[in-house]
Amino acid sequence: FVRWLVNMADVNRVIQTQSSNLTPVKDAGVKKSENIHSKSENQELSKEEKLRQRKEKKQQKKNRREDKGNAAQPEKNATESQVQQQKVSGPTVVPSDASVNNEKLPSGKSKAELRAERRAKQEADRAMKGVKKGDSSQSFGLKSKTAASEPQSVVKRLSEHVQADDPAAQKRLAKKLERQQVPLRNDYGTKVNLFSHLHQYSKKIPLTQQTSIPCTVIHPSIVRLGLKYSQGIITGSNSRCIALLHAFKQVIHDYSTPPNEELSRDLVNKLNPNISFLIQCRPLSASMGNAIKYVKKEISNIQSTVKEEEAKAILKECIDKYIQEKIYLAAKAICKFAIEKISDGDVILIYGYSSLVNDILCDAHEKGRTFRVIVVDSRPRQEGREALRRMVRKGIHCTYVIITAISYMLPEVSKVFLGAHALLANGYVMSRVGTSQIALVAKAYNVPVLVCCETYKFCERVQTDSFVSNELDDPDDLIVTQKGSTHLEDWQNNSCLRLLNLVYDVTPPDFVDLVITDLGMIPCTSVPVVLRVKNVEQ
Amino acid sequence: MSPGVDKETELSDRIETFLAELKRGGNGRGSAETARQTAGLLRRITAQARWGNAGELMDIIRKEGKRMVLAQSSETTVGNTVRRVLKIIREEYSRLRGRSEETDQQESLHKLLTSGGLSEDFSAHVPALRANVIEVINELLTELEGTLDNIAMQALEHIHSNEVIMTIGRSRTVEAFLKDAARKRKFHVIVAECAPFCQGHEMAASLSKDGIETTVITDAAIFAVMSRVNKVIIGTQTILANGGLRAVSGTHTLALAAKHHSTPLIVCAPMFKLTPQFPNEEDTFHKFVSPQEVLPFTEGEILAKVNVHCPVFDYVPPELITLFISNIGGNAPSYIYRLMSELYHPDDHDL
């Protein structure tokens, strides 16, 4: 990593010499030239050529449009102005930096003056754009951070990962990724019509095949992490979040502020391509989204007077505190609440592998409660086997069935414990696909359903069905060879056949009897209350 | 004498092979095929066995039938066919003896109420009985062969265009039903794969070859996609006497999800699947197969310490079912008990 930094410095010098050769094209579109440093890489020349070509195209476009009297590059400016409206760029939002333009004006003006000029220009553009685009649809975005004190004047954008069928949105995304030098992942296989707005990727084609090596834009630990996400090596919202935060700590450790830059602003911009890369590997979970929001908030709160080393230490400590408080201690608190609900002689049914539910049961077993567990599993992920292994190791008496057999097992079950991926603001529980089914059948047999979820997974989104926002996994996972014949082997060649591998589903609140959180035991409908309390605290 | 003895040994050989096949699980034969084979075998017994009067014939058939049912108690079509043949014998006997046929509805209702008291005397020798019984069994065989077409013919009355239909596992009846409708209408089918045997895959491959737009989903996603489904059409292994079903494992979840979304649940099943048996926990209702399908032996370290269950069937109560479509038309679940009285004689309910 030291070499990485040294390389950056060398390449900077190369850029400076080269940029004097380039024609100083209008700097509309360049917001922060400091990002030039961060975007340097070994393949200087090819990138330079590409940039030159792009600049020429832009110049032509500008000449064509100048007589319209509008600002140059209306599209590009529009996205930028939209971005300006948001306080802090979320991971799906482009800071619209201009790694594009590597050039710098010859030393006539200082950078600060350049910046001021550009800002003034963009204010003017935005004023015009604001009139034009005032009524463009602004809907809910997952990760936009807005001041909590203004709950209603939130301007949120729909994240691109649920707009796979909108070509304009996909083009915007492709442009943004190109600017950030993050490869774009292609969809795989024909999608079911109901889900054509979602992306469907294949596990056999990981994103890292398209990244250049060495990749200086994306930190190596993030590349490793993204690969683990897309291959399914790290699954489960808690593990993904903890792994993400550890990777961020590594990035912060290796970060060094470029001269004339402020850590609080620059570090966020350095993190954004990394986050885009992770999103391309696998869409973010609600827990990861909340964690990213927190980290960005902490970064932007760093005073400019604080020295770099101290700032980094502060940030790392914040991240550690977050993990400790929101995940580990929360788990302990939930265990304490949950053990009151487990009596001796209980038969408890669990579904799949939830780290929290596993902790609860192992803890209760250690505290001496006698109960037995029925583990329900489903294809194709078969995560229940992992839960089974861990509990058998602890000595808990277990039974194992597949989800089609729950009607047979439920008459002897006394309680159902379910984990959650996120709790939505209208009380719906978003969890692994199959959870809603278990809750439904348990309700039919009058068995109480308890959902365990930490508060950091609470999310302001609302959703009523499992279609509008979901994740499509690799459809090839469904193929299985039974008795020597694989019926679905060439489903791709059959235009009438589709495979659907959903990852999440939402459970309506009337199926859930109780939610156990670190703040206590609440009914499903009290989620917005908790969210409000949390926002006020922040 | 010796040709008679040969015939007898040949007959018992056939019965033995049939029983052995049943015990082994039927080599993937459908229930229709099993029913046809049973009826064929019973016809042979009627033709070749030595009996003097109707009572003796019924005893022979009952004895053989009991052995067949015991060989594979979950294969209820065998027992049902035996009961049908017994009813045929009773009817032919009373017809030949001069009593009127009970086609009158009131008569049958009266019979329903008073059936406990009458006991027929089957000891009279009626010469034409053998031939008549064989003839009626032939009619039964033709009926059995035509059940699939009869049910498929009703498909257009129930499926409109651009529908989304959900089904589970693999049922030859439903397959024929959907393929017949697909000739004239365009609709989508979602197939739940029905782990652990994943018969749904075969069904989906077969349907998509006929140009029906099919989607395969996992069993865990049944409730998630149910809100976009217009109808649920399933097959079943058995129809119980109260109108409930004994169907493949996972059907109860499907039925509950359909009820939650108020989606009609249609069961396509021919009449020979109707069993005069009520759901009863002690009645070996459930059948289990090797848990190797659920937790394979590769998970050896934990296999010894866990219980693994792999039930094959599910009970679906009649309240969750909207309609039965069979070869004699469509019926509500509340009407099943009447159909049963027309097919089987109450004395034969326990073989």
Image (cartoon, coloured by chain):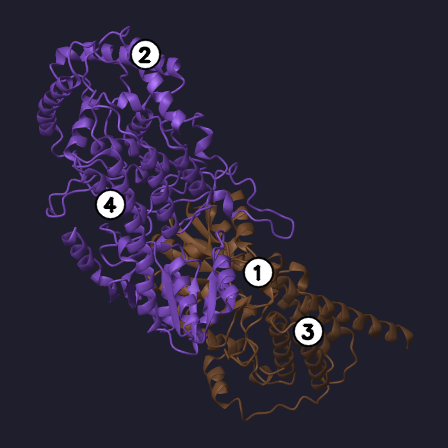
Chain colours: A purple, B brown
Q: In the image, are marks 3 and 2 on the same chain?
A: no
Q: Quadrant of residue B59?
A: bottom right
Marks 1 and 4: in contact by CB < 8 Å? no
Instruction: Using the numbered discs, state the Cα–Cα distance from disc 4 to disc 1 in whole angstroms.
Output: 42 Å
Q: In the image, are marks 3 and 1 on the same chain?
A: yes
Which residue is disc 3 drawn over?
B71
Q: Mark 1 Cα within 10 Å, few/some/many (few <14, many 20+)?
A: many
Name the amino acid, label 3: Ala
Q: With A21 as the anchor, is B334 left or right in this view?
A: right
Relative vertical location of residue A501 with respect to residue B335 in this rendering, above or below: above
Residue B205 versus residue B210: which sits nearer the camera?
A: B205
Q: With A294 as the anchor, is A219 left or right in this view?
A: right
| Whether residue B328 is visible | no
- Camera-near label (2 vs 4) is 4
Pinpoint residue A35: horizontal percent, then vertical percent: 26, 24
Name the image quarter holding the N terminus of chain A: top left
Q: In the image, are marks 4 and 1 on the same chain?
A: no
- Camera-near label (3 vs 2) is 2
- Camera-near label (3 vs 4) is 4
- SS at badge 3: helix
Q: Give the letter of the chain under mark 4.
A: A
